[in-house]
Structure formats: C-alpha cells, structure tokens
Image (cartoon, rainbow, N blue to C red):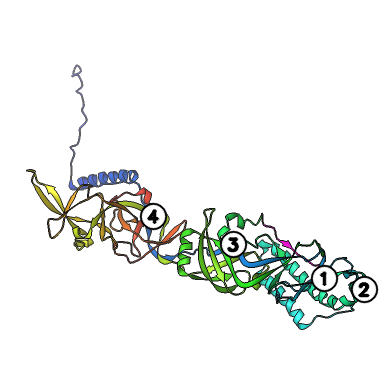
Amino acid sequence: MANRKPEKIKKYRKPLNLNIGMIIFGVVLIYMIVCIIIYFQTGHIRRYEVQEGSLATDNIYRGVILRDETVIGASAAGYVNYYAREGERVAKNDLVYVIDETGRLNDGAEGAGTGENSLSEKELAEFRNEIANFSHGFNSLDFESTYDFKYSLMNTVLKLANANMLNNIGELGDSGGNIIGRANAPQSGAVAYWTDGYEDLTAENITAETFDTKEYEKKQLTSNTLLAAGDPAYKLASSENWSVVIPVDPDRGAKLQEEGYVKVKFLKNQYESWGKTQLHSNADGNTYLELSFNNSMVTFLSDRFLDVELIVEDETGLKIPVTSIVQKEFFLIPEAFVDAGGSSGRGRIVRQCYLEDGTISSEDMEIDIYNFDDETGEYYLDSSILNAGDILYKLDSQESFTVSKRATLIGVYNMNKGYADFKQINILYQNEEYAIVKSNTRYGLNVYDYIALDASAVHDDQLIKE
C-alpha cells in the first residue's frame, strides 16, 4: 500500500443544459447588440412638425424724399431778413424776405425799440404745432433732427420779429442811409430755408450712395446772414405731388408694384396714407420702389430722409425652415402617358420591356407623381425609377413616347412613412430662416406633417431614425 502511486484527479464538468429561456435570452441579447451597433453607425435625422404660420417681415424702410423744388437766388448782395415762415404757402408776388445792403437795418430797428410785445393766439398756435410735431416724432438715434427743429423755431421767431420791423421800414430805410430791397416770390409754393444739392434728384438716378447720410450735408439758411447776389436765399416747393423712394428686394418690389398702391405709415408723426407704387431698376444694379403721394407734402418739407412703414398683409401658409428645402430632378411626361388615378395616390404608366427570348413587350408600373404642370400638361415623375431613353405607351393605344425631358422641383423630405419621401412645395415668401409655402396642394405638404429639418443630411428613400 505504501508503494502505490496516487491516482490523477480530474475535475468533473457538468453537462450544458440548454433550455428555451436561455435560447430566447441569447437571441434578444444578440438583437440588442446589433441594434446598438446600427444605432451608432446610422445618421440620425431631426424632424420638424409643419405648422401654419406667417413671417413677421421687416416693413420699415428709410427713403429719400423727392419734390418739385426750385432754389431762388438772392436778388442782391446784403443781409437777408426772412418774413415768410418756413413751410408757409406764399402766392406769386408775396413778400418772402427783405435784404439790407448796408447792414444797418437791424441796428436801426433795435434803436427804434418797439417796446414789449405779446404773441397773438395764432402766433402761439404756430409754436405749439411745431413743438408737438417735433416731440411726437423725435428719435434719440437721429439727434440731428434737433437742429432742424432749432432752425425752424428760429425762423418762426424771426418772422414775427421781422413783421414788426417791416412796419418801421419807412422810418429806418433810406432816410438812415439804408438800402433795403424787397424780394417777392416768383411763383406760388411752400417756402423752405435750406438746401442740400438733392433738389434736382430724380428716382431714375438714385444710387446706394444717395442714402449714405455720412456724406449728406444740409445747409440751413437763416436770417441776418450775409449773402452775395445769386446765392441761395430760399426755395419753393410748388406742387403738392411728392414721393418717397426706398431700396427694396427685386421680388418684393415686383409684388408691391403689381398691387398698384400700398398703405404707408410715416414714423415721424404716425400718419398714414396710400402711395402709388413704381419700381425702378437703376444703373447701380439695385432696385428702388417709388411711393407717390398727392397730399401732406408741406408736413415733411423740412425733411430729405424719411422712415416709413409699409402696411401690407403678411403671407400666411405652412411655415417650414429654410434648411429643410431641397431641389430634385424629375422627368417630364405628357399627361396622355400617365394614369393619375392609381392606388394610394400613385400614378400608372406602361413601359416597354424585353422578355427573356428578346421579344418586345410592355409592363404596367406604379410610380409616384410629384407635380403636374397645368400649362404644359406634363407630370413630374421620379427619375430614380425611369431612365432616359425608356419608351412609354399611351394607355389606350400603341403610340409611344421616349423619356428624355427633365426639370427640377423645390421641395422637402416628408418623414411620415418612416423614410424620406420628397414633397413639392410652392414658396410664397421666404427670409433667412423660414419660408411660407402654399397649403392644401395636391402633391405637397399638409399641416402637422413631419419633414427632415436638415435636407442636406437626407437622400431619397432613406430610412429615418430619430
């Protein structure tokens, strides 16, 4: 017994007992692993739910004012003293200003002393109106308008003072060595005491530089200023017809011109008026819309630039992101070769084919229809199903048509069915972020449809995973 060698001990292995539970667990585990791998290898497409809406378009523009203006030069050299108030309408031969060739008229007037004066109710009303208009339309970003208001009040004060002075011209005139000349209006019109070089500007020669206010210079004409003969003394706006020219996008301008008239709000005083529209494509390559009016010219006589708001109806329809829009190419097939009453809204065509023995035959095919052109009578059919050179037959005869003509449509990828399905859209209006498209079209979108948010990440018939 002592000489016996120990026997080698082997570990007992239990037999693998498979049951239905383990098999199901294994299958589920493998499926989950495969799904996880596919999930991380597949691009995920974000979707967007189509809703009805409108675009809040920016309808505020800065325009340049055009009127029938005539600059009147000084009749003689001397110190000018205005009598007519700015914005006042004068008739032909009405007194506008007097000119003192010696400069001693004001000194004589001050020496004469007219005593303490009070303003009449009419004169006070002039000041109240000017102050109210300025306060209502004041914009802190356009502080330069404050100086226009200052000069306007100054001219009003001087006009009232000059009225008293004119009563004493007989006493202060030639007897004191003064040479005083009266300047009457050569024609009727509204008086303005400023110039800017834009008096002869027309809508056709406006450029982008016209709106550059940094280069714009407005010269005010004030009383007691020494003028040379022929220097600008004042100007007359003789017609109530005037216009505001604004820069616009060509497409938007074309729509506004087609309407003929557009309602305009003047932001300076919140007044509204209807302007007649006329589109101009000028030499600088830009498009400008002229809004013409036949009233309220005097209200804005002291302005060259004016901020206006176009009161137009916003386009309403289906609101979609611009990133969802894509173009796709299709074959154009005449109406006679397509049966548009196929099942599930699809069309049916008859295409030539070859049998195994080489004989010519035909086959019926269902195919998606993406649009129909009423003018040409042609259907847009999928170019991934048809090929150039395919021969189609009429549905009720053997007349044939060879597929070749192509055209593109603008659309989006619909995701309702779980794959990328192109849908044609008609864009009514578009900005940088969203587009408004026509609703209830035969081959288009409907409200609450789901579309791909980024069309560049999708291809035709791609399975969609969110």
Q: What secondary structure characterizes most of the magenta part?
A: loop
Callout 2 secondary element: helix
Residue position for label 2: 175
Residue range in magenta is 216-223
Q: Mark 2 vs mark 1: which is more N-terminal?
A: 2
Q: Residues within 10 Å of mark 3 (few under 14, many from 20)?
A: few
Q: Do the residues labelled 3 and 1 touch (CB within 8 Å)?
A: no
Residue at the top extreme of this rendering: 3
- Residue 221 part of the magenta-drawn span: yes
Q: Is residue 322 visible?
A: yes
Query: What amino acid is found at the position of numbered circle 1 in the picture?
Result: Gly
Q: Mark 1 vs mark 4: which is more N-terminal?
A: 1
Query: What amino acid is found at the position of numbered circle 3 in the picture?
Result: Thr
Residue position for label 3: 202
Q: Quadrant of the N terminus?
A: top left
Callout 4 secondary element: helix
Callout 1 secondary element: strand
The answer to whether 441 is drawn above or below residue 355 in the figure is below
Residue position for label 4: 324
Q: Quadrant of residue 144?
A: bottom right
